[in-house]
Image (tube, grey):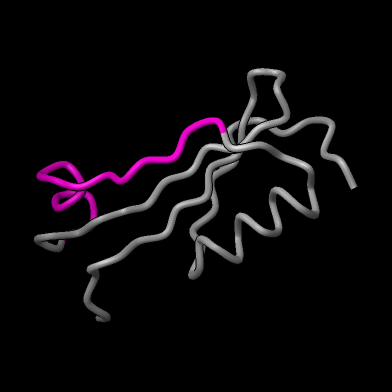
Amino acid sequence: MKVEWMNHTGVSVASMARALEFYKDTLGLEIEMDTILEGDFLDQLSGQEGARAHIVYLGNGDGRHSIAVSYTHLRAH
């Protein structure tokens, strides 16, 4: 299956490896950016010191994208 249109859809995922398998292999999207976000901004956003997020932007080349986010270093409430 190939995704024809998707616009700035964000999804929090438990396993980035499994999510990328699905987005790339099943939906046919390609990685556009792969980064780690951390620091004061994410600490404030999550309410937890030392929070980290692995963020991957995926798309099909038309300028629109989907975002997979895997949070690490967060304590369960």
Residue 62 coordinates in the image, percent (x, y): 71, 19
Residue at the image point whose x is 16% and y is 41% from the top: 41
Q: Where is 39 relative to 51, above or below?
A: above
Q: Is residue 39 magenta?
A: yes
Residue 21 coordinates in the image, percent (x, y): 67, 59
Instruction: Report whether 74 appears left or right of 50.
Output: right
The stretch in magenta equals: 32-47
Q: Find the residue positioned furthest to the bottom.
A: 77
Q: Where is 15 relative to 2, above or below?
A: below
Instruction: Report whether 19 appears left or right of 14.
Output: right
Residue 51 coordinates in the image, percent (x, y): 20, 59
Q: Is residue 26 magenta?
A: no
Residue at the image point whose x is 47% and y is 33% from the top: 33
Residue at the image point whose x is 71% and y is 39% from the top: 29
Quarter of the image with the C terminus in it = bottom left
Q: Nearer the viewer, residue 54 or 8?
A: 54
Instruction: Report whether 38 appears left or right of 34.
Output: left
Residue 63 coordinates in the image, percent (x, y): 64, 18
Total marks shown come to 0
Residue at the image point whose x is 70% and y is 22% from the top: 61
Q: Find the residue positioned furthest to the top.
A: 63
Instruction: Report whether 33 appears left or right of 77.
Output: right
